[in-house]
Image (cartoon, coloured by chain):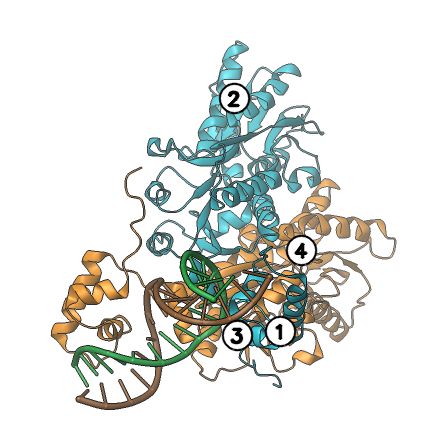
Chain colours: A orange, B cyan, C brown, D green
Amino acid sequence: MTAVRPSAPTLEEVAAAAGVSRSTASRVINGSTQVSDAVVASVRAAIETLNYMPNRAARSLANQKTMAIALVVPEETMRFFGDPYFASVVDGITRGIAHSDYVLNLQLAGPGSTEKTIRYLNGGNVDGALVVSHHISDSYLASISQIVPMVYNGRPVNRHEVDSYYVDVDNTAGAAQGTQHLVDIGRTRIATIAGPADMPAGIDRSFGWSSTLSAAGLPATRIAHGDFTLAGGERAMRSLLDSPSSADLDALFVASDLMAVGAMSVLRERGIRIPTDVAVVGFDDSPVAATTSIPLTTVRQPATEMGEKMASMLLELLRGRAVEQVCILPTSVVVRASA
Amino acid sequence: MTAVRPSAPTLEEVAAAAGVSRSTASRVINGSTQVSDAVVASVRAAIETLNYMPNRAARSLANQKTMAIALVVPEETMRFFGDPYFASVVDGITRGIAHSDYVLNLQLAGPGSTEKTIRYLNGGNVDGALVVSHHISDSYLASISQIVPMVYNGRPVNRHEVDSYYVDVDNTAGAAQGTQHLVDIGRTRIATIAGPADMPAGIDRSFGWSSTLSAAGLPATRIAHGDFTLAGGERAMRSLLDSPSSADLDALFVASDLMAVGAMSVLRERGIRIPTDVAVVGFDDSPVAATTSIPLTTVRQPATEMGEKMASMLLELLRGRAVEQVCILPTSVVVRASA
DNA sequence: TTGTAGGCGTTATCAG
DNA sequence: CTGATAACGCCTACAA
């Protein structure tokens, strides 16, 4: 109601107020050490009283940096938001860039609407990109990574991307840990609800499950696929229970907590006791895992740290520094009540 | 590895290639009608072959517009992502701006970390802002709305903000509809799990519930508060069942589907049948509502449309056009199995 | 209908 | 240590 934006003060005005030149004012703003203390003080004072803020556009134009990072999500909005795992990753990302001057540009590029994102990324609108929840079919990203630095959440699946940066956990090993726990507590008919076959996490966790069973001399035949959603977990659980060849399962390794929650509700609905009749192990250790009525035993992956690490890697890259291409964070089994 | 960005082509080069001046090239790019067809064609061709994309920073600098919109979320990341309702709203928002040239800047301004967002919004870094999931305590936003156009998702609670733009549903009426449904099916001991008292949606829905009960001559005493999370719903349900004054409830109006899911799992865990013993009505009609083992009867609010409407309102505002300050979308009761 | 020229707010390269 | 002076890429009167 009162203060209509009084056309933001410019560097010029700050300089005038401080009695120096634009250049000098610019120097103190950018933290040059080559400025006398007295001048620094007066410029700072001028900035303070004028409430000066550098103009982003002008800055970008002058130094060829956008100070923006794209958060690319090649996924349906609903699925992305529905999974607490992503919430944690994004949380980590925002933490990671919080102390930088970069802003996050949200690029929801669900199936079918990738065009705009591609043009955006290629158009020099951002200095770098963070990719979360990508699929095999998202190969268009590979070509972009040659234009702007890019860090993936999870190993990219395309072979063109052998030289890309990513942070991940060892999904195979994690799944093996979870499955081994089931073996260790004496289960022998261990089924799995695997993730989608077009995502690395889906593929690798499925493999970790089957190889562990093989190593234990157990059959790896009881398998159903979900899509990492709660409803998908329920559907998969039903198909497992309704199939003669897998209905006798006494344990279940589920590739994500969200699907595990769905699976458990089906189990309960059918009067199957957890863990007595069927022991359940999930994957993620997302917040839901601890709050289900039967707390979920799960393979923990440090989602928030993964997000932070993605951010810091990209930031380093943007500083022109060399960075390890791959960062694998550890998983661990968190034992609760379900197995 | 191969193609290092070959310093994007500029308007200058396009003009040269087309054999015209910068100004003319600029005109065809900005769709001026005052250009001869022949010239338009040749400039378009040049743009095509050079794969030209206007430089955002330069454009911003020249016309004093950032072409960016902030998506402000004064909420903990986890809660924001955890609620499918927000997923739908954001989905609508991205749809709404998809066909514009605006970019979405994600501003996760959880409790405690609002400083950066405030400076960002005030610093002229965006042309407008969309606010989702705000609380009473987020009064700092009011001052910002005097600087940049701002559209809220849901009625702002502060009285300073009487002149603000928002899209919402009539939460009171919606809650009344849902509660009335419970009354209509003959329930008399109708409890509620209300939302937080520092959010308009929480306050209004609680009021809709109590006023409907009063009108029906029923007591509005059985109440517990949740925080719109699944775990919060579980906690509230337990406190309701454990309190002598409310344990006898035969129906439940829950202020959000997510909390309703939590409540229902507690109900089942205690062997209470739905809807036979306790009828349950939720609020949102989010995707989870249809996929619970007992499909949830709920008050539908058109979340996606709300997001789209927010976007279109802001876009209109940015075009300098007048817009109705308030847009209230309709709610309706979706009857499924739980009540 | 088209071209010229100046300016948007910073940074960077020079001299001094 | 400080100050001119060019860019940076685009838009827009104004003039032709």
Distance, label 2 to label 4, CA atoms, is 39 Å
Q: Which residue, given by chain and number where applicable, does mark 1 sit on?
A: B18
Q: Dot 4: what SS?
A: strand
Disc 3 to disc 2, C-alpha distance: 64 Å
Q: Residue B193 shows which numbered tag? A: none
User: What separation in Å lies between label 2 and label 1 (alpha carbons)?
Assistant: 67 Å
Disc with the residue nearer the chain's start (3 vs 2): 3
Q: Do labels 1 and 3 share a chain?
A: yes
Picture quarter with the N terminus of chain A: top left
Whether callout 1 and callout 4 share a subunit is answered no
> Mark 3 highlights which residue?
B12
Residue B132 shows up from this direction: no
Residue at which label 2 appears? B209
Type of amino acid at the residue the image marks with label 2: Trp
Amino acid at the residue labelled 3: Glu
Between disc 1 and disc 3, whose residue precedes?
3
Secondary structure beneath disc 1?
helix
The Cα–Cα distance between marks 1 and 4, rounded to whole angstroms, is 67 Å
Classify residue B129 as left or right of residue A279.
Answer: left
- Which quarter of the picture shows residue A75? bottom right
Q: How far apart are marks 1 and 3 (CA)?
A: 10 Å
Nearer the observer, C16 or A245? C16
